[in-house]
Amino acid sequence: MSQNYNQLRAMLAITKGSFKAIIRNPSAVAFSFGFPLVFILVFGFIGGGPPSVSVALANQRDTAASIIRGLLRNPMIRLTGDPDTAMVRQDLVKGRIAAILSLDSARSPAGFTQYTVHTLTSSASGDKYPILKLALAQSFEYAVEKYAAKEYRPIIVDELPMIPGREYSEIDFILPGMLGFSLLSAAVFGVAFLFFNLRQQLVLKRYGATPISKKYIVLGEGIARVMFQLITAVVIIVIGKFMFHFTLVNGWVTFLEMLFLSLFGLIVFMGFGFIISSVAKSESTIPPFANLFTLPQFLLGGTFFSTEAFPVWLRRICEILPLKQLNDAMRNVAFEGAHLTDCWKQLIILTIWGIATYAVAIKVFKWE
């Protein structure tokens, strides 16, 4: 009988069965195809074009000038929509924009119009201004006549004295992102695994046999996780402050506002954990379900790098992500001195996510 056994056929049968098992495993598909593609696309968008910076105009009417229009056609330059107001000055001091531009013109002795482009920058924009200078050189090169005397050149760039700006270090960007990263991971993965295991081990069913109300069972488990994560947030902020000089503009007030934002974001994110714990059929399906929600946010939520490098259409998608809103609110409060009332846009979007998420969680949550 062993002589009639076809070893090749058996091997092919095993190969076929193993292949079907792999393609039916969401985790294997996600980690083998989905996540590498996401990384490739995201980092491809970042490296796919030249660096760019934002500028503001002191006079919005200057956009009608051919010199400014030529500059704005350069892909390295983005024009902010605000005029030269106190808000724009604050953006310059905080390093959000490279410079404020103004334009003067006069009739030269040779009889043609001569333009002077004034650039006002700050010490906080030191990493952005060289990009602007390169864009100025590229955009104005066509207008500088090779044989004209220097004093008759049609365009002069006048760099105004630099104004002082608040120093923005790498930790001021990274720490809020890492804090949001920690809160999202703990809320989604922690809650999903916790309630799935409680259900699988019939703990929730046994709880149901006791007099305690079901909502208090969920609240008790949820509060314990919230307390643990808030302690984690405190540790992250304290280490960042005293070891790496993380900026807390208003001291204790900023610290408490960051804790409130951490609590608010954590409660919203936990709703996704409740949903995943209910829809997962086995413990092995929890990671792929959770990663489908968390990984795009880690990459597109401004966690590790600014979303300004993305195309416009992708930045619009980023703006609706809850982690992006939490990260933005954290950075606005910590470095820019904003208060919770100034973060109303981010809080509203997070609230909408929270209402929608818990509405689904209540509908799909299972006790057995």
Image: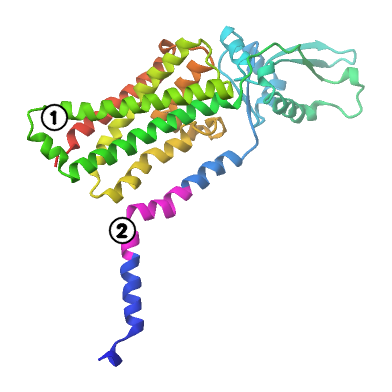
Q: Position of residue 48 (x, y in %)?
A: 60, 42
Q: Which label sits on residue 274? A: none
- Does residue 123 appear left or right of residue 312 in this picture? right
Distance CA(mark 1)–CA(mark 2): 35 Å
Q: Which label sits on residue 214? A: 1
Of the pair 137 and 95, the residue shown nearer to us:
95
Please determine whether, in this image, residue 160 is positioned above or below residue 131.
above
Q: Amino acid at mark 2?
A: Arg
Of the pair 196 and 63, the residue shown nearer to us:
196
Q: Which label sits on residue 24? A: 2
- Sort mark 1 into few (<14), some (14-19) or many (20+) by Cα contacts within 10 Å: some
| Quadrant in the rendering for residue 51 | top right
Please determine whether, in this image, residue 217 is positioned above or below residue 87.
below
Decide whether the magenta segment is chiefly helix, strand or loop.
Answer: helix
- The answer to whether residue 80 shows anywhere in this view is yes
Identify the element where label 1 is drawn.
helix
Q: Residue at x 26, y 39 (%)?
A: 194
Q: Quadrant of the C terminus?
A: top left
User: What span is in magenta?
Assistant: 20-37
Identify the element where label 2 is drawn.
loop
Q: Residue at x 65, y 25 (%)?
A: 72
Q: Amino acid at mark 1?
A: Lys
